[in-house]
């Protein structure tokens, strides 16, 4: 199975990190801004780079600045590292991690949530939740694009709504985390698209850049929160999952065409 992400066919692969047991788009290119007075990054040796952790759903990072605008969908600008990028604590600050070019077999696309001359601040897929970091954009190795889509999930209403350019497209009743294993809230993004080799409860899993706050690991993975289908419609409208959001088959078909990196807002 393939999905379309910024005009590129992305092969989807099995997921071991999900907590699952429980409109095609052609975005316009976004040119990087050029200004004077750019803070240069600190020098990092090859040995130091080799010791940095990778910013993936499987890692826990230290010292990452926390996303404070968790209810703001952002500008829709997303970026893809065409080469591994060093993630810094702040412009000119210390290096924290390496953002790789791929995540779970899909291209890495992350939302841009802040800018400074020569730099972009992005959401990261690692623990702790709401982690961000700064990338030196004037150094090259970034491909920018724009996604008009966003997903909003209202937990108390068991409601998932899809928007395009602030216009409501579709809305569905979904199942969310049980009281002991709640779905975490905040601003996150569509991280990858994965097809289980032997589908049981869903043909497709859409991991987010978010993790369970109740479970450190689940089913052999890091308790990555995902959107996925469910064969029993009686679960929709209930707090019942291990933290993932279970969606109807019609919703999953539509969501499978949303570009990677598109923002997802989860509120109580």
Image (cartoon, rainbow, N blue to C red):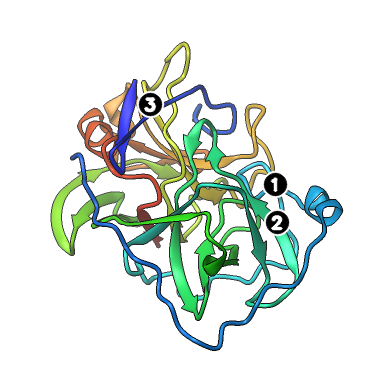
Q: Earlier in the sequence, mark 1 or mark 2?
A: 1
Give coordinates of residue 34: x percent, y percent. Answer: 43, 77
Give coordinates of residue 24: x percent, y percent. Answer: 20, 39
Does 120 sit left or right of 66 as displayed?
left
CB within 8 Å, label 1 to label 2:
yes
Q: Residue furthest bottom?
A: 37
Please tell me the numbered disc located at residue 204.
3
Q: Badge 1 is on which residue?
A: 59
In the figure, 45 relative to 231: above or below? Answer: below
Q: Earlier in the sequence, mark 1 or mark 3?
A: 1
Q: Could one spot residue 179 in this view of the protein?
A: no
At 65% across and 77% down in the image, what residue appears? 40
Q: Badge 2 is on which residue?
A: 97
User: Quick one: quadrant of the N terminus?
Assistant: top left
Give the SS element for disc 3: loop
At 40% across and 75% down in the image, what residue appears? 33
**CA gap, disc 1 to disc 3?**
23 Å
In the figure, 158 relative to 119: above or below? Answer: above
Bin the neighbour count of mark 3 within 10 Å (Cα to Cα): few under 14, some 14-19, many 20 and up: many
Q: Earlier in the sequence, mark 2 or mark 3?
A: 2
Give coordinates of residue 30: x percent, y percent. Answer: 32, 63
**CA gap, disc 2 to disc 3?**
29 Å
Observer-side mark, 1 or 2, equals 2
Does 179 sit left or right of 147 as displayed?
right
The answer to which of 229 and 99 lies nearer the viewer is: 99
Observer-side mark, 2 or 3, equals 2
């Amino acid at each position: 199975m393939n999905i379309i992400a910024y005009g590129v066919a992305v092969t989807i692969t099995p997921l071991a990190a999900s907590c699952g047991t429980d409109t095609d788009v052609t975005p316009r290119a976004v040119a990087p801004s050029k200004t004077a007075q750019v803070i240069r990054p600190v020098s990092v040796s090859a040995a130091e780079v080799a010791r940095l952790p990778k910013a993936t759903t499987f890692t826990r990072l230290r010292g990452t600045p926390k996303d404070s605008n968790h209810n703001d969908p952002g500008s829709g600008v997303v970026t893809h590292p065409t080469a591994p990028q060093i993630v810094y604590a702040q412009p000119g600050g210390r290096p924290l991690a390496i953002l790789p070019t791929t995540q779970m077999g899909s291209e890495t696309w992350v939302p841009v949530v802040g800018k400074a001359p020569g730099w972009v601040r992005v959401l990261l897929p690692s623990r702790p939740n709401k982690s961000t970091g700064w990338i030196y954009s004037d150094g090259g190795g970034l491909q920018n694009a724009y996604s008009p889509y966003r997903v909003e999930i209202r937990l108390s209403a068991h409601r998932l709504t899809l928007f395009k350019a602030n216009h409501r497209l579709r809305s569905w009743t979904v199942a969310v985390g049980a009281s002991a294993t709640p779905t975490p809230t905040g601003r996150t993004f569509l991280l990858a698209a994965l097809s289980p080799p032997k589908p049981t409860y869903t043909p497709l899993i859409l991991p987010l850049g978010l993790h369970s706050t109740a479970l450190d690991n689940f089913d052999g993975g890091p308790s990555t929160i995902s959107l996925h289908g469910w064969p029993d419609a009686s679960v929709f409208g209930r707090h019942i999952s291990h933290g993932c959001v279970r969606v109807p088959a019609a919703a999953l078909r539509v969501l499978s065409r949303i570009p990677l990196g598109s923002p997802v807002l989860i509120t109580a």
